[in-house]
Image: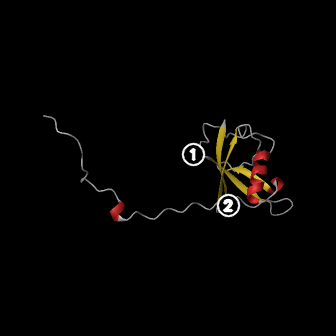
Amino acid sequence: MDVFLMIRREKSTIFLDATEETKVIDLKKKLEGIVKKAPEDQKLYNMNSKDELDDNKTLGDCGYKAQSAKAQDPAIIGLSYRISETEFEEGAVTPYSNPPELPDVMKAQEGGGATSGMAAD
């Protein structure tokens, strides 16, 4: 079954799809073609628990299932890069900005809604 993923790092967001049977290392290899960083220089982690994803496990083993990682609501995975021989950068993700408030002319009008229909005789 397909799982849809949103990979987040700092201000970057990458959307990928994979299967529940895809190994984490294979996901890193897909990312290598996008971010130009070798799989051993990447760390993927669960955004909620901050637990690192094991390269030898499948996405399904890590809890990413088709029922919870849908196209309209993808699962979020954090991405960090290696900064030294033994250390990875802190998993910082910049939050999305909020859109500006709608102008008054675009807000819903109160009470003045027109109804259409035919009167019954």
N-terminal-most mark, 2 or 1: 1
What residue appears at the point 84 percent right and 63 percent down from the top-left corner? 84
Q: Residue 73 shows which numbered tag? A: 1
Label 1 sits on what residue type? Asp
Q: Nearer the viewer, mark 2 or mark 1?
A: 1
Residue identified by numbered label 2: 92
In the image, is 16 to the left or to the right of 121?
Answer: right
Q: Which residue lies furthest to the right in this view?
A: 85
Count neighbours of disc 1 (C-alpha within 10 A) and say few if under 14, some if 14 to 19, many if 20 or more.
few
Closer to the camera in the image, 9 or 16 = 16
Q: Where is residue 10 in the image (x, y as percent from the top left)?
A: 66, 62
**Tag 1's secondary structure?**
loop
What residue appears at the point 57 percent right and 45 percent down from the top-left corner? 73
Q: In which quarter of the image is the N terminus?
A: top right
Label 2 and label 1: CA atoms lie apart by: 21 Å
**Tag 2's secondary structure?**
loop
Q: Position of residue 34 (x, y in %)?
A: 73, 57
Label 2 sits on what residue type? Ala
What residue appears at the point 80 percent right and 63 percent down from the top-left corner? 83
Q: Where is residue 21 in the image (x, y as percent from the top left)?
A: 74, 37
